[in-house]
């Protein structure tokens, strides 16, 4: 068993080759998709949870 891997972790992990180019069509589609998500408003319930967490971390 290799020492560089944690138990239960697969030893054959695929790594991306940084020299490989992402096709333009995929890059454009991902950019559009993530732009749409970023333009969505944050739900009020989520904002309230974040405020509560922030207050708790500050000790308020």
Image: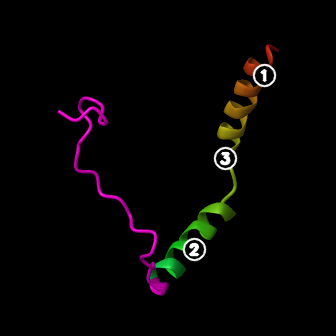
Q: Secondary structure at mark 2?
A: helix
**Residue 59 place in picture, x, y as percent:** 79, 13
Colour logic: rainbow
The residue sitting at 65% across, 39% down in the picture is 46
Q: Is residue 22 magenta?
A: yes
Which residue in the structure is indicated by mark 1?
55
Mark 1 vs 2: CB contact within 8 A: no
Which dot marks residue 37? none
Label 1: how many Cα within 10 Å (few below 14, some 14–19, many 20+):
few
Q: CA distance from mark 3 to mark 1?
A: 19 Å
The residue sitting at 53% across, 81% down in the picture is 28
Which stretch did the figure color magenta? 1-25
The residue sitting at 70% across, 42% down in the picture is 44
**Residue 52 place in picture, x, y as percent:** 72, 25
Q: Secondary structure at mark 1?
A: helix
Mark 3 vs 1: CB contact within 8 A: no
Residue 45 occupies quadrant: top right
Which residue in the structure is indicated by mark 3?
43
**Position of 55 relative to 51 (above/below):** above
């Amino acid at each position: 068993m290799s020492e560089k891997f944690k138990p239960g972790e697969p030893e054959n992990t695929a790594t991306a080759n940084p020299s490989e180019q992402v096709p333009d069509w995929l890059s454009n589609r991902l950019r559009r998709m993530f732009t749409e998500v970023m333009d969505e408003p944050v739900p009020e319930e989520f904002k309230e949870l974040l405020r509560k967490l922030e207050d708790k971390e500050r000790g308020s």
